[in-house]
Amino acid sequence: MCAEIGLTRAKISTTAAGKDDLDRNSATGNQPQSSTTPPRDKSKMPAIRGADSKKKTRRHTRDLDQIHADLHSRRHLEQHIQQYDEAELPAFGLFYCIPCAKHFESETNYMKHEKGKPHKRRVRQLKEEPYSQKEAEAAVGLTTDNGRKKGDEDMVAEDEVADEVR
């Protein structure tokens, strides 16, 4: 009964042109969409964590430590490239920028890329040595003490001298 009252109120407030839409929508149980709100385009909708997160996920490249290993070890680079099927890569994988970990469709695009700022910025970043696990543990204080260090010998000698004086 309540549904009938709501439906009759909606019929009274609509015009003759909107009545057909209302009847069609009421048969399926859907409410007519207001004319002021355009329908949403899902491709333009932001991600749950924000629009920037969606871009970052899509454009994720290899990390600097992985690229550094590629530059210093040919075997490491070959293992990475063998993951992909050559037929699926642009230009069958011929034009590959190792510092940027990016494939290009033509030699001209590759040459333009090498002259650009993003490539130069990445090369500058790769000049620094990446942090190792050992350095990270030392920074936190998780190093192991396996005996005396070179600096400790002097302190032991000073302690022995101090004991003799007493």
Image (cartoon, helix red, strand yellow):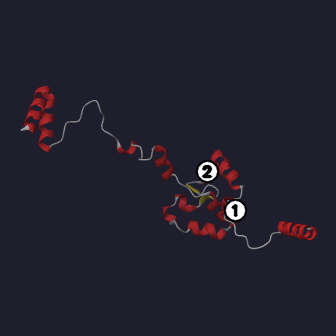
Residue 108: which disc?
2
For this orientation, the residue located farthest to the left is 1
Q: Considering only vertical position in the picture, is 117 above or below 163? A: above
Query: Which residue type does callout 2 highlight?
Result: Thr
Percent from the top left, x then y, of residue 111? 64, 51
Amino acid type assigned to the residue bearing label 1 in the image: Ala
Q: How many dots with numbers? A: 2
Q: Is residue 64 above or below residue 2?
A: below
Q: In which quarter of the view is residue 21 placed? A: top left
Residue 130 shows in this picture: no
Sequence-wise first label, 1 or 2: 2
Image position, residue 32 (x, y; %): 20, 36
Foreground: disc 1 or disc 2: 1
Question: What residue appears at the point 13 percent right and 39 percent down from the top-left corner?
Answer: 26
Residue closer to the observer: 95 or 23: 23
Would residue 41 appear left or right of 144 to someone viewing this image? left
* Residue 101 in sight in this render: yes
Label 1 CA crowd tier, 10 Å (few <14, some 14–19, many 20+) = few
Disc 1 secondary structure class: helix
Quarter containing the C terminus: bottom right
SS for callout 2: helix
Name the residue located 93 percent from the left edge and 68 percent from the top edge.
165
Residue found at x 80% / y 71%? 148
Tell me the distance, in whole angstroms, between the alpha carbons under discs 1 and 2.
Answer: 46 Å
Judging by the rendered image, the residue that carries numbered circle 1 is 138
Q: Nearer the viewer, residue 55 or 78?
A: 55
Q: Who is closer to the viewer here, 133 or 123?
A: 133
Q: Position of residue 50 (x, y in %)?
A: 45, 44
Decide: few, some or many residues near mark 2? Use Cα within 10 Å; few <14, some 14-19, many ≥20.
few
